[in-house]
Amino acid sequence: MATTPPTRSPELRKDPVTNRWVIFSPARAKRPSDFKSKSPENPNNNSSSCPFCIGNEHQCAPEIFRVPPDPNWKLRVIENLYPALSRKLDHPNGQNDDSSSELSGLGRVVPGFGFHDVVIETPVHSVQLSDLDPSEIGDVLIAYKRRIEQIKQFDSIKYIQVFKNHGASAGASMSHSHSQMLSLPIVPASVSTRLNSMKEHFNQTGKCSLCKVQSKDLLINETSHFFSIAPYASSFPFEIWIIPRDHSSHFDELDNKKAVDLGGLLKLILKKMALQLNNPPFNFMIHTSPIQITDSEIPYSHWFLQIIPQLTGVGGFELGSGCYINPVFPGDAAKILRELNVP
Amino acid sequence: MATTPPTRSPELRKDPVTNRWVIFSPARAKRPSDFKSKSPENPNNNSSSCPFCIGNEHQCAPEIFRVPPDPNWKLRVIENLYPALSRKLDHPNGQNDDSSSELSGLGRVVPGFGFHDVVIETPVHSVQLSDLDPSEIGDVLIAYKRRIEQIKQFDSIKYIQVFKNHGASAGASMSHSHSQMLSLPIVPASVSTRLNSMKEHFNQTGKCSLCKVQSKDLLINETSHFFSIAPYASSFPFEIWIIPRDHSSHFDELDNKKAVDLGGLLKLILKKMALQLNNPPFNFMIHTSPIQITDSEIPYSHWFLQIIPQLTGVGGFELGSGCYINPVFPGDAAKILRELNVP
Ligand SMILES: Nc1ncnc2c1ncn2[C@@H]1O[C@H](COP(=O)(O)OP(=O)(O)O[C@H]2O[C@H](CO)[C@@H](O)[C@H](O)[C@H]2O)[C@@H](O)[C@H]1O
Ligand SMILES: Nc1ncnc2c1ncn2[C@@H]1O[C@H](COP(=O)(O)OP(=O)(O)O[C@H]2O[C@H](CO)[C@@H](O)[C@H](O)[C@H]2O)[C@@H](O)[C@H]1O
C-alpha cells in the first residue's frame, strides 16, 4: 500500500452494518484550536491572533459575502479553511481504494463534494450570540437562509446542516462566536429516519408531529411565530426545541419579520440557559428537510431548531445503542426555565 | 404540577420525530464519581475508598454472582447502585404524565423495567483489563454470557447492551476496571436499523455483511476464531471491530474455548491501541442481536465487538446529522496497527 499523499481528497462512505454515512477528510486533522486546553474556562481572548476578528480578514479562507457589504461588517460568511468536504471535487477521482468501483455500485462510496462554510456572527471577539439584539440575531438567521438559497442551485447537494458549537466541551475549536454550514451530497440517515418517523406519526394521528405544543407542561416560552419546549422524550437534560408555529418544511422559508421574532426567542432561551445552568457549553442545530422533497412529504415535514447544553458526557451505552439516559424529566426542565426571570 | 417525588420511577419514552427511545432515570443523577476532574490523568487510585476493590464488597449494591464463588474472587457481577432501569418495576405505575395513556396507546412510553449490572473485572484497583491473561479476559466474557443467560428468562427484556467505559473522557465515573450490562424492555432504534441494514446487504449480495474480511487492507490481527479490522466506513479514527469468523447471531453463543481466543485478541488490540495512541480513554460495545429474533433473521445477523478510542470530540454537525467526520482513512489505521509490534 502506497503512503497516502497529503492531498488525498475527501470521500463519503456508508457502512453496510450501521447504515451510516461517514465523511473521511484528512484536511480536518490539521485545523488549529484556540482553546488552550479542552476546558471551557480557557478560551484565547486575544483578538489580535483571532482570524475571525474584524481587521484580520486576510487570515481567513475566502469570503462568500458580508453584511453590510462594507469594511464595517457585522457578520461574514466565509469558506472553512479546513473543510470536511471539497467544493472543487465534482466526480469520482480515482483515488479510492481498489474496492471502490464495486462499492460505488452498491451506493456505498461517493466523492467528498460539498460546501463547508463558517458564519462569523459578530466582528468583536468578546461578543456572544446572545449578546446581540433580536434583529442582529435575525440577520445571522437570514445569512443562513441566503447561503442556503445559493447552495440549493447545486443539484448534487442533498442536505444542508446548519449548526453552532459554543465552548470547548461542545466541540468548538474557535472561541470567537460563529456557526457552521455543511452542505452534503447525501441525505444523512438520521434525517431520513426523522422524515419516516414524522410520516408514521402523521399516518397514525392525521397530524404533523410538530404543529402543536405537545402539552402545556412542556412549554417554555412563546412568541407570535414560534414556541419553545422541552420535548417529551428529550435525549439530554434541559434540551430545548424552538418550533415555528405555522407549518413549514424548510428553514429557508423564514422571512425577515419571523427572523427577528425567532432572534428574540433564541436570545431569551440562550440567556435563560446560561443563567440556570451556569453558562454551559452548548450546540444548536437546525433540523430542516432535504432540499429535494416531494409534495406528499410536505404535510409532515416541519423544521425546528434544537439546543443541547452539554451537561453530561456519554458513554458506551449511548454509543452502542443510540439510546440516551436522561436524569431530568422534561416537564421539570420546562417548569424551571418557564418560571425563570431574566433580568 | 406537583413537585416530583425523589422516588419517581424510571420510564422510557420514544420521540415521534427522532424515533429514538430515551431512558428517564432520576436516580442516575445521584451517582458519585471517583475521577477528581474530567481529566483522564486523575483517577482516584486510593483503593481503600473504592467499593469495587476486594474487601469493600459491603459498600456495593447486592452481588449477583462471583467467580470463583469464594472470598478470594477474581470477578464479580453486581447490581448497579444507581440503576438506569428498575428491576422491581414490572407494569405501568401511574406516575406518568397526564398524557401517558394516550402515548402508551401510541407505543411511545413504557415503564422503566430492566436490569443494570456492573461487572467488576478484577479485585485489584490498579489492574486494567488488558493486564489480565487471555483466559482471565475469557472469564470476564463468560461472565457476560452467564448473566445474559439469566436475563433471557425475562420475557419483557428485549435487548441487552454490554459495554465498557475506560477513562473519564470515555464517560467512566469509576476508575476500577469494570464493564456494564443494561437489559432493556425495548429494542433500541440503532439495533433495528443495524438489522435492517444487514438484511438489505444480504438481499443485495447474498452474503452476511460480517462473515468475511472486507479487504486485506483493513485487517489488523486474526486468530483461529476471530479477526479484527478497521471497518471500511469507521465513524471514529482508529475504531476497531472484532468479529467472530463463524457466523453467529448472538454473543452468548460464545463457548469457553472461543472466549479464551477472543480474550487473547482483545488483549493484543487493547495493548496496541494503548501503545500507538498513548493510552487513550476508550469504550467497547458488544453488538449482539435482539433476544427474540426469527429464523429468517439468523442468516444476516452476526454479532461483533466494537472498540472506540476517544481521540476527538464531536460537535453540532454529528449531533444534528448523525453523520461523523473521520480524519483518518481506515486503511491507514489498519496498516499502522497491523505492523505495530507489542513488546
Ligand atoms: N482562518 C480560518 N479561516 C476559515 N476557517 C477557519 C480558520 N481557522 C479555523 N477555521 C475553521 O473554523 C471552524 C471553527 O469551528 P468550531 O469551533 O465550531 O469547531 P470545529 O469545526 O473545529 O470542530 C467541532 O465541530 C465539528 C463538527 O461538528 C466536529 O467534527 C469536531 O469534533 C468539533 O470539535 C473550524 O471548522 C475550522 O476549520
Ligand atoms: N458502590 C457501588 N455499587 C454498585 N454500583 C456502583 C457503586 N458505585 C458506583 N456504581 C455504579 O458504577 C458504575 C460505573 O460506571 P462507569 O464508570 O462505566 O460510568 P457511568 O455508568 O457512571 O456513566 C457513564 O456511562 C453511562 C452509560 O454509557 C453514560 O450515561 C454516562 O454519561 C457516562 O458517564 C456507575 O453506573 C455507578 O452507578
Image (cartoon, coloured by chain):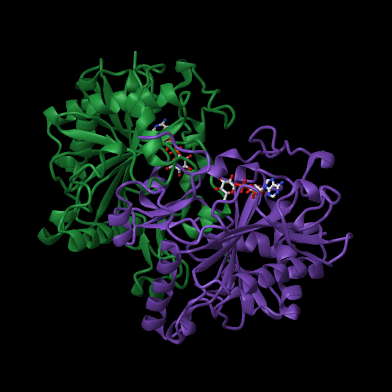
Chain colours: A green, B purple
**For this view, does A259 lie left or right of residue A280?**
left
**In terms of image quadrants, where is residue B195?**
bottom left
Q: Quadrant of the N terminus of chain A?
A: bottom right
Q: Number of callouts in the render?
A: 0
What residue appears at the point 19 percent right and 55 percent down from the top-left corner?
Answer: A155
Q: Position of residue B187 (x, y in %)?
A: 45, 66
Q: Position of residue B236 (x, y in %)?
A: 53, 54
Q: Position of residue A17 (x, y in %)?
A: 46, 69
The answer to whether residue B115 is above or below residue B29 is: below
**For this view, does B31 lie left or right of residue B261?**
left
What residue appears at the point 16 percent right and 54 percent down from the top-left corner?
Answer: A207
Q: Position of residue A283 (x, y in %)?
A: 40, 36
**For this view, does A198 lie left or right of residue B14?**
left
The answer to whether residue A124 is above or below residue A330 is: above
Instruction: Tell me if I can see residue B221 in this picture.
Output: no
Residue nearest the observer in this picture, B54 or A161: B54
Residue nearest the observer in this picture, A183 or A113: A183
**In terms of image quadrants, where is residue B41?**
top right
The answer to whether residue B252 is above or below residue B179 is: below
Question: Quadrant location of ligand 1?
Answer: top left
Instruction: Tell me if I can see residue B242 in this picture.
Output: yes
**In terms of image quadrants, where is residue A56?**
top left
Residue nearest the observer in this picture, B82 or A313: B82
Q: Quadrant of the C terminus of chain A?
A: top left
Q: Residue furthest left?
A: A295
The answer to whether residue B7 is above or below residue B22 is: above
